[in-house]
Amino acid sequence: MSEDYKGGLNYALLKRHYDCDDYPSLVVGGVTLLNGIPFTATPTYYTSGLIAYLNDVNVVDVDRGWTLFTHGQPAVPAYLALILAALGVAWPAVVPAFEAKDTLFWSDQDVWVQFEGGSRVRQFIPANTYFRTQRRWFMIFVTRAGLIDGTLRLWIVG
């Protein structure tokens, strides 16, 4: 808050500060099992907050914007299947998530990203380029844009 706003809040400033954050990196027992979202020609998806939750199940707080999100995907993403099996975690139909409000993307290969559904408009992210969006989302779909598979890294706040 600012001292310039006596008796009130600067909501324009306050609304850009978010309590939830996520980065798809999973470390178990000092070993990095996942650092980004690997993508191929087959679309895969990511739900905001998923890895934050797997890293610390106590991070979920409804007062800070967490909710239960029905993702509608019948199977666990391929890049998480072995990790979740090793951790003994079954893939639920509803996962804890938060609404992402500011996301920074970076990919080592050209990639397409779709927000909220596999049939939505695709956003192209060129290789080795930072792409930032303030679009609000719960789930993204990721597909390679070229002939080479790659890894998408994203920093998410919401």
Image (cartoon, rainbow, N blue to C red):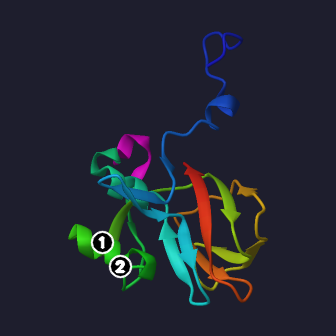
Residue visible at 67% across and 60% down in the picture: 105
Which SS class for mark 1?
Answer: helix
Q: Which mark is residue 107?
A: none
| Alpha carbon separation for disc pair 1 and 2 | 5 Å
Q: Which mark is residue 81?
A: 2
The three-letter code of the residue at mark 2 reads: Ala
Residue 145 in view, yes or no: yes
Quadrant in which residue 130 is drawn: bottom right
Whether tag 1 and tag 2 are in contact, CB under 8 A, the answer is yes
Residue visible at 51% across and 54% down in the picture: 23
Quadrant in which residue 84 is drawn: bottom left
Side of 47 where 118 appears, left or right: right
Residue visible at 42% across and 41% down in the picture: 64
Side of 90 where 156 appears, left or right: right
Q: Position of residue 125 (x, y in %)?
A: 75, 70
Q: Which residue is mark 1?
A: 84
The three-letter code of the residue at mark 1 reads: Leu
Q: Is residue 114 above or below residue 1?
A: below
Q: What range of the chain is rendered magenta?
A: 60-66
Q: Is residue 36 above or below residue 132?
A: below
Asked if the magenta segment contains residue 126, the reply would be no
Which SS class for mark 2?
Answer: helix
Q: Position of residue 50 (x, y in %)?
A: 41, 61
Residue neighbourhood size for the residue with mark 2, other residues' Cα within 10 Å, grouped as few (<14), some (14–19), many (≥20): some
